[in-house]
């Protein structure tokens, strides 16, 4: 899937993902397999190419242009045909990657449609991921994470991507509170589920939790006592996932605010925190938040995640 260079540069709006990837790359901890999940309008495909281009030290070079045009043999892109990726396609990919005699250096393969693999092709890919070549990196892309094999997910670093159209979606929802309408658009929910959440009222608890979080950070308060009355929320796996998702959104905005001024979000003065936090701390927080979200998705104890999160917030 060739990308235009201008569209590819929009990936720099995903500063939290870039910070996370750069940190792992610089520390020699980059994953051998990534799973990028998001809607069709998100930047997940662009980021897949960014991983490959940055890994090959090809940013802003002629090689970058070749990769974006799918004209460089070290980066292989495949996608579904007739809404499926067959076993034959995966075997063909493996054979090409195993043919190291013709190609030197790192190699990357991008599979757009990890949720379109059938049982046979998924199992074939799993065997390939389970025995990684140090010079080969897998980059899988999906829209529906639930349709990806758990055994594949467990071997990948999962990153979540959101739409850029939050305000447009928010206008379609019914609520007297503009902040709540906007907040639910950042969550991994369908439009109907967003409206249901607003009708049930729990997003108000989530917003209250976020506001308490940043108030505690600003006042350098101990976290645990501030959330004693929110234990029903903080001990629930689903809501903890939403809380982590929103912290990633807000800290990403703060990180971006150190580069270009950002508007407040949900009446939280994020711009004030650009002077409180050092860039290195923000990168560390975003790295940890993505790590916590992945651990939570794989059934790590919710209380443990909460305690680690509070410790991270208090160590500013």
Image: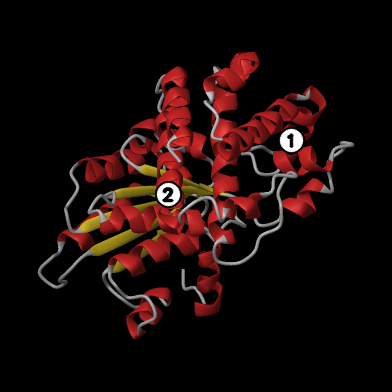
Q: Report the front residue among 131 and 51.
A: 51
Q: Position of residue 207 (x, y in %)?
A: 70, 33
Residue 91 is left or right of residue 219, and the answer is: left
Q: How is the rendered protein coloured?
A: secondary structure
Q: CA distance from mark 1 to mark 2?
A: 32 Å
Q: Residue furthest bottom?
A: 62
Q: Which residue is mark 1?
A: 194
Q: Nearer the viewer, residue 306 or 46?
A: 306
Quadrant, the C terminus: top left
Q: Nearer the viewer, residue 229 or 29?
A: 229
Q: Residue 194 appears at what percent x and percent y?
A: 74, 35
Relative to 301, is 123 above or below? below
Q: Residue furthest left?
A: 101
* Residue at mark 2: 281
On screen, residue 193 versus residue 171, left or right, reads: left
Is any part of residue 114 visible from this angle? no
In percent of the image, x 55 and y 73: which residue is there?
7
Q: Which mark is residue 152?
A: none
Give above or below for 24 relative to 180: below
Tags 1 and 2 touching, CB below 8 Å: no
Residue 44, can we see it?
yes
- Extreme right residue here? 176
Left or right, 99 with reference to 314 = left
> Element at badge 2?
helix
């Amino acid at each position: 899937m060739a990308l235009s260079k201008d569209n590819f540069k929009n990936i720099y709006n995903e500063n939290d993902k870039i910070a996370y990837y750069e940190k792992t790359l610089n520390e020699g901890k980059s994953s051998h397999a990534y799973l990028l999940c998001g809607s069709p309008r998100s930047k997940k495909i662009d980021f897949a190419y960014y991983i490959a281009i940055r890994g090959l030290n090809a940013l802003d070079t002629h090689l970058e242009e070749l990769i974006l045009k799918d004209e460089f043999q070290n980066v292989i892109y495949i996608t579904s045909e007739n809404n499926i990726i067959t076993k034959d396609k995966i075997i063909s990919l493996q054979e090409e990657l195993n043919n190291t005699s013709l190609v030197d250096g790192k190699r990357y393969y991008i599979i757009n449609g990890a949720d379109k693999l059938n049982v046979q092709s998924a199992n074939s890919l799993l065997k390939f991921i389970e025995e990684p070549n140090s010079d080969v990196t897998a980059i899988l892309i999906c829209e529906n994470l639930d349709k990806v094999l758990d055994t594949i997910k467990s071997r990948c670093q999962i990153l979540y991507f959101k739409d850029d159209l939050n305000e447009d979606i928010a206008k379609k929802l019914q609520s007297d509170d503009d902040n709540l309408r906007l907040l639910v658009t950042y969550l991994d929910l369908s439009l109907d589920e967003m409206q249901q959440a607003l009708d049930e009222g729990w997003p108000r608890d989530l917003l209250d939790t976020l506001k308490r979080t940043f108030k505690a950070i600003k006042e350098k308060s101990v976290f645990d006592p501030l959330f004693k009355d929110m234990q029903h929320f903080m001990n629930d796996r689903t809501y903890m996932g939403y809380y982590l998702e929103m912290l990633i959104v807000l800290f990403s905005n703060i990180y971006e605010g150190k580069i270009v001024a950002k508007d407040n979000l949900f009446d939280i003065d994020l711009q004030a925190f650009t002077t409180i936090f050092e860039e290195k701390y923000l990168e560390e927080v975003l790295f940890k938040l993505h790590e916590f979200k992945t651990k939570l998705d794989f059934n790590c104890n919710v209380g443990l995640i909460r305690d680690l999160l509070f410790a991270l917030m208090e160590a500013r």
